[in-house]
Amino acid sequence: MRARAGRHRVDRVPGRSGRVAAVSIPQTIGLTRAMFTGPALSRALGATGPGMGLAAVCGPVLGGVLTEAWTWRSSTR
């Protein structure tokens, strides 16, 4: 019999988040290209890259802070 951590397979979470990022980043760039033209497109794409980078840095930190404040169990409710 295999040991499990509750109902969820915690070891699969990083793989799922990577697949979601692999799908959502091209979608974001495609939507940006559909919504803007000309110089506005350049500015929008110029803001998208740093925004994604900032999210990649701040996301895990914010997740850690929230997990410490509310425990990890709050994420599964």
Image: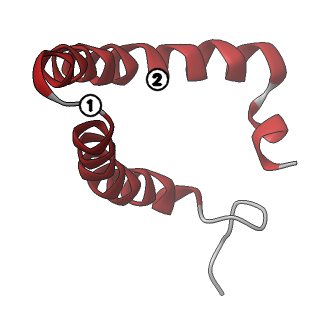
Residue placed under numbered mark 2 in the picture: 60
Which residue matches tag 1? Answer: 36
> Circle 1: is it few (<14), some (14-19), or many (20+) Cα within 10 Å?
some
- Badge 2: how crowded within 10 Å, few (<14), some, or many (20+)? few
Q: Which residue lies furthest to the right in this view?
A: 77
Q: Which mark is residue 17?
A: none
Residue 6 pos. (x, y %): 78, 62
The kind of residue on which mark 2 rests is Pro
At 58% from the left and 56% from the top, the residue drawn is 10
Cβ–Cβ under 8 Å for marks 2 and 1: no
Displayed quadrant of residue 75:
top right
- Residue 42 picture location, percent across and down: 12, 19
Residue at point 82% right, 21% down? 70
Relative to 76, is 40 on the left or the right?
left
Q: How far apart are marks 2 and 1 (CA)?
A: 30 Å
Q: Position of residue 72 (x, y in %)?
A: 74, 34
Q: Which residue lies furthest to the front in this view?
A: 38
- Between residue 8 and residue 42, name the one nearer to us: 42
Q: What residue type is labelled 1?
A: Phe
What's the residue at 88%, 48% (across, down)?
77
| Residue in front for this viewpoint, 39 or 43 | 39
Question: Callout 2: helix, strand or loop?
Answer: helix
